[in-house]
């Protein structure tokens, strides 16, 4: 009887540790409805953020009605937070106007406030954003997510301090 | 006599393969020399930019080291932080690709220090930093970060690993650079130039 009790306690403790791990890896869902700055194109962005020791974020951007740009220009999707623009990749335009992009990063991107789609040249040597085409504000999906982190962002300027650090150390 | 003749013929045939392997050239091994002994075709264009045919292809291993150099000036310490970044970019209009695989060793462990490491690609011309994600180092200072994006990454010049506070609410890189390495561009690569307005506001925002 005593052994059974000990065994039960052991199982209970192990189950608690498993549940603790699950609590640590919480999921947050964000979404944005994208609207075109010119024209009637529409779109949406869904973000799934897994918080925890190894954070991961997945973004799915879909658009309808974006104009065809030919083979000289492409669209680029961005996550924007203050002055910081995080590229999510480029995608070519299509005749049907329907495009999609999936982006995965090992990071918690709950800092993101906007999803923006820009127009870029096909061979783009400039990492900075081009002409804005669509924009959408990220909001929490309350039905399925646990919480939205409310960070106090400390955004530095777009110049960035890293560059000056490299220069000050003579790195060219 | 007949046997000797057959043997000699067989010997000659076998020996000819040696000559063939020595002198034979495949159709791709053509000497690219014109009438005046000058190189002709694409190879004579000295400022040829491979990007005219699509995204430039770079497959390179970038060696990462501390920004102040190795700690032991008399020799490279066995336990100095170090790492590699396998940098891979290329593709076409419809299938652009960029991949970075960062592996570090002997970097001070972060799992119990309230900090976390973040990988960045940094473009010197524009000052733009692209975050590749965050990762931890554990026993042995070992850490790994994998990043994939549907985009060519040839425009970036450095792979930089910084130490960030955890949780990291600021997407910009901190000043605490743990490791860095320069991406070597292929010959003929033309760097972009920017105006001060582009540096501050981007290409289409000013």
Image (spheres, coloured by chain):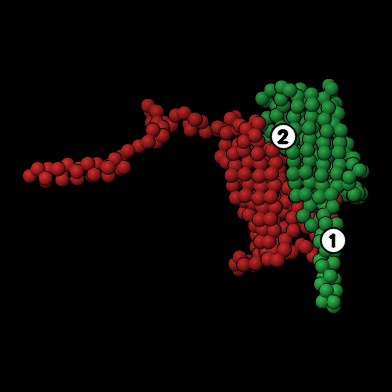
Chain colours: A green, B red
Q: Residue at x 83, y 21 (%)?
A: A39
Q: Residue at x 60, y 50 (%)?
A: B61
Up/down of B18 relative to A66, above or below: below
Residue A74 as seen in the image, left or right of residue A7: left
Residue A162 is situated, as x and y percent measured from the top left of the image, at 76, 50
Nearest to N terminus: mark 2 or mark 1: 1
Front: mark 2 or 1: 1
Up/down of A38 relative to B23, above or below: above
**Tag of residue A20:** 1
Residue B82 as seen in the image, left or right of residue B198: left
Residue B112 is situated, as x and y percent measured from the top left of the image, at 79, 65
**Which chain does the numbered disc 2 sit on?**
A
Q: Quadrant of the C terminus of chain B?
A: top right
Foreground residue among B194 and B76: B76
Q: Quadrant of the N terminus of chain B?
A: top left
Residue B115 is situated, as x and y percent measured from the top left of the image, at 80, 59
* Dots 2 and 1 on the same chain: yes
């Amino acid at each position: 009887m005593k052994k059974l009790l000990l065994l039960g306690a052991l199982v209970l403790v192990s189950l608690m540790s498993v549940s603790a791990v699950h609590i640590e890896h919480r999921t947050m869902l964000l979404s944005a409805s994208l609207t075109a700055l010119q024209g009637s194109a529409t779109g949406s962005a869904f973000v799934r953020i897994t918080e925890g020791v190894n954070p991961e974020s997945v973004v799915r951007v879909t658009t309808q009605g974006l104009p065809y740009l030919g083979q000289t220009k492409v669209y680029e999707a961005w996550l924007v937070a203050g002055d910081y623009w995080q590229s999510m990749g480029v995608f070519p335009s299509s005749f049907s106007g329907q495009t999609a992009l999936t982006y995965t990063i090992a990071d918690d991107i709950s800092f993101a406030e906007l999803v923006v789609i820009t127009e870029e040249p096909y061979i783009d040597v400039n990492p900075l954003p081009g002409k804005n085409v669509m924009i959408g504000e990220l909001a929490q999906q309350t039905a399925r997510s646990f919480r939205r982190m409310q960070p106090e962002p400390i955004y530095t300027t777009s110049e960035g301090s890293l560059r000056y650090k490299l220069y000050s150390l003579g790195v060219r | 006599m007949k046997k000797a003749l057959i043997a000699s013929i067989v010997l000659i045939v076998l020996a000819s393969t040696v000559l063939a392997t020595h002198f034979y050239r495949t159709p791709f091994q053509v000497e690219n020399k014109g009438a005046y002994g000058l190189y002709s075709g694409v190879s004579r264009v000295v400022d040829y930019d491979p990007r005219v045919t699509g995204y430039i292809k770079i497959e390179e291993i970038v060696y990462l080291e501390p920004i102040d150099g190795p700690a032991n000036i008399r020799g490279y310490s066995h336990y100095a932080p170090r790492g590699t970044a396998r940098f891979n970019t290329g593709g076409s209009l419809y299938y652009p690709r960029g991949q970075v695989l960062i592996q570090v060793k002997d970097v001070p462990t972060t799992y119990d220090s309230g900090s976390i490491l973040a990988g960045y690609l940094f473009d010197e011309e524009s000052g733009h930093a692209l975050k590749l994600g965050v990762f931890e180092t554990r026993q042995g200072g070992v850490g790994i970060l994998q990043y994939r994006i549907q985009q060519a990454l040839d425009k970036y010049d450095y792979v930089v690993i910084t130490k960030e506070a955890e949780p990291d609410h600021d997407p910009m890189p901190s000043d605490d650079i743990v490791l860095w390495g320069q991406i070597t561009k292929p010959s003929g690569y033309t760097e972009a130039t920017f105006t001060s307005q582009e540096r501050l506001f981007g290409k289409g925002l000013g």
